[in-house]
Each structure stands twice: as C-alpha cells, then as structure tokens.
Amino acid sequence: MNFKEQLKDYQRLIESELQKNIKKEDCLEKILNESMAYSLLAGGKRLRPILTISTYKLFKQDYEKCMPFAIALEMIHNFSLIHDDLPGIDNDDFRHGKPTNHKRFNEATAILAGDALLNYGYIIISNELQKTNKDELNKKIQVFQEFSKAVDRMIAGEYVDTEFEKRNITKENLDYIHKNKTGALLILAVRMGAILADAPKEELEKMTRYAQKIGLAFQIKDDILSEEGDEKKLGKPVGNDKEKGKCTYVSQYGLEESKRKLEELINEAIEELSEYGEKAEFLKELALYIEKREK
C-alpha cells in the first residue's frame, strides 16, 4: 500500500471513530451538539491521531488500545480551532472551505462548543482509565498527565501569540510560541503512541526528537502557505497573518530562509527514524507530506 492510500485509510478510520463519539440525542442542548459535530467532522488532515496510531504501530500492532487517546486528542485539537477562529482571537470566517463555527452558528455557541469538545476529550480518557486493569493503569496515567500538560502548553502558546500581535518579537519568543501553540499537541501525539506501546526510554526520546522537528516544520509550512498558498486549496484566505501583524517565521527569516529551514527540519526528522528501516516508512513519508502539503 502506498503512502497516499495508507493516509486515506487512517483518515477513514479516524472519521469512523469520531462518528461513534458524536452526541446525537434529542435534548435541549441539541444545537450545541450539532455545533460540536460541525467542527469535528468538517474534515482536516487528522494528523495528530494518525501520528499516535502510526507511532504505536512502530512498536506494537494492536493499535485499538491507543484509539481512545487518539480520538480525545482530535477533540482537543478541534476545540483549539474553534476558539482560534473566534472574533477575539483570529477572527476568521472560513476553515476547510466552510464557514467557521461562530459564523455557522453564533459566537456564544462556538465558545461553548469548543469548551464542550475540550471536556469531552477528558471524558473519553477518564472512561478509558476506569476500564483499565492495574497492570496498565500507571502507563495510562502517565499519558493522561502528559495529555493535560500539553493542552496547558497549547493554550499558553495561543495566548502569547495573541499578546504579541503587531509587536516585534525575538526569534526565541517566536520559537516559544510555536513550540507550545503548535508543537505541544504534535509532540504529545507521538509520545502517547510510543508510551502506550511500551517503547523503551531511548526509543521514546528518539521519537520525541522526531516529533519536535516535525512540529516546528508544520508551523513553518503554515507560515509559508499563509504567504504564498492557494486560497482554494487552503479553504481560507491567504495573507491574514500579515494583515493582522502576526510575527511568523516568514516575517522573521524571509521566505527562502524559511523554506531552507523547513527542509532541514524534515531531513533531521527522517534521520531520527533511520534505524527502524521499512517499519518507519509511513512516518518518514508523513514528514515529507508535512513539507510538501498545500493545505
């Protein structure tokens, strides 16, 4: 199976699992549930849960054991997207080519839908912990702790990003923003898969370095696409970051240097996987996908 086929298989798997976790009951908060589902099922790359599953499969094959954590992470990611689009933060009208949540519903519903997805992610993990036997519990508690800390870091990075709009910042502060805002959940995705699959400490460290590199690369590519991407493929306007005075890797380093830095990070990430051979082929291709993506 080639990379594109395998990626689509993973995406279909994630979509199916998300469908199982949508609230469909007829109740007074039915519109809120529809708002949650609207963003959760709007599409997207599903990169974070795919990273969790594919990392797990590098060490073990019974990937179903990591699925609740992968789905919980995708709910957290979508909570962050809903809030990121709000008028008080990025004030975006479109995501994945569709009206953003607050445009489709209203601002209050969007805020609460984001809150609900954040909480639902924790409900899924707490349900999983409740079913876990004593032998597996410590490992899953470790993952839960890392999950909670990564969400905290993602929110912190988002705050600092908004705080520094229209201000000149150092390269160190730019790295700090995106190590947290973007990188924290991508690193978590890989570490969850490795920990749940009982990867040895040195293997966990290697996979963490891989995740750190693709996490930064992902943000640099986002900044490049915001500068010169195809609006139709992105599903949202190009140039918003520049208009809002956001400090990006392109504004700090220039377009060509950003592209060079992106390529360097992807090569370094792939090198971290060299000893795994063909077993890590999908993860290597996934790094290249991050570099070459058009949306």
Image: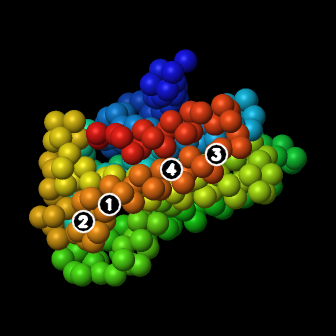
**What label sits on residue 258 in the rendered view?**
1
Q: Which residue is mark 2?
A: 254
Which amino acid, mark 4?
Asn
7 and 251: which is toward the camera: 251
Q: Neighbour class for label 4 at 10 Å: few (<14), some, many (≥20)?
A: some
Q: Is residue 246 above or below residue 36?
A: below
**What label sits on residue 272 in the rendered view?**
none
SS at circle 2: loop
Q: CA distance from mark 3 to mark 2?
A: 29 Å
Q: Answer with mark 4 or mark 2, whichever residue precedes in sequence.
A: 2
Q: Which residue is mark 3?
A: 273
Which corner quadrant holds the N terminus? top right
Which amino acid, mark 3?
Leu
Residue 115 horizontal/vertical position (percent): 40, 55
**What label sits on residue 267 in the rendered view?**
4
Q: Answer with mark 4 or mark 1, whichever residue precedes in sequence.
A: 1
